[in-house]
Image (cartoon, rainbow, N blue to C red):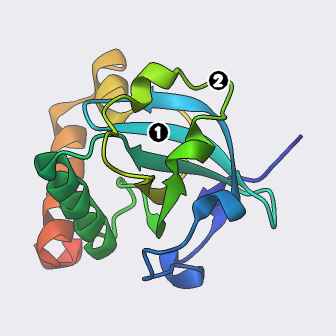
Amino acid sequence: MDYKDSSQIKSKNEFFSDSESIDLSEFYILKSILGSGSYGIVFEAERKSDQLKFAIKVLISDSDKNVERFNREINFLRRLNNEYVVKIYEVGFFLKKFLETIDFLDIGLLLNIKNNLSVNAIVLEFVSGQPLSKILKKNNQSFEFSKKIGIELLCSLVGIQHRNV
C-alpha cells in the first residue's frame, strides 16, 4: 500500500493530543522496526484514518531513570521547532499484550517491561533517509555546513530566531 509521509503535515498542532491516556493501537498500525536502543524501540507506523506514515517510539524499560529520560525527551520535543529535528505529534501508550502479538517483534525486547501492563509511546514525524550524523560523515560535509546546522539547533533550543544571531 502506498501511503503518505507525515512530514507533509505543516503544524504539529494539527492533531497533537496533550492527553497521555490514548491507546495508540486504536489509531496506528505498526509496520516494522526502524531501530532500537537502550530504552526504546522505534516503529514505522501508519495512521489508520488516512494512511499517513509516522515513527512511533515505545519505551521498553520501566526503570525510573529511563521513564524520566523518556519524559524529558517528550518535553524537549514539544518545545523544539526546527527543520533538523523530528516533530512530535501525540503521546500515548500501547498495551503490553498488544505488543506481544506483533509477529515481527522479538519478544525478548519486551523483557524489560516487568511491572506495567502498558508502555508509554510517542508519535513522531517519519523522516526517510539517514541520520544527519551519517550524512555528514558520508558526504564529508564542510565545517561551515555543520556549524550552520549546529547554530540553528542551539538557537531553537533557547528560542532565538536564527536571523537574530
- Judging by the rendered image, the residue that carries numbered circle 2 is 104
Percent across and percent down for residue 46 are 71, 51
- Pick the residue in front: 122 or 23: 23
Q: Earlier in the sequence, mark 1 or mark 2?
A: 1
Q: Position of residue 77 (x, y in %)?
A: 30, 65
What residue sits 53% from the left and 54% below the top?
94
Q: Position of residue 35 (x, y in %)?
A: 45, 28
Residue drawn at (81%, 49%) of the image? 3
Can residue 86 be seen in this snapshot?
A: yes
Q: Foreground residue, 94 or 57? A: 94
Quarter holding the C terminus is bottom left
User: In the figure, 97 relative to 23: above or below?
Assistant: above
Mark 1–mark 2 Cα distance, whole angstroms, equals 13 Å
Query: Toward the viewer: 28 or 141?
Result: 28
Q: Amino acid at mark 2?
A: Phe
Q: Residue at position x 43%, y 63% from top?
A: 87
Disc on res. 53: none
- For residue 148, say whether it is visible: no
Which secondary structure lies at badge 2? loop
Q: Which residue is mark 1?
A: 42
Q: Where is 20 relative to 52, above or below?
A: below
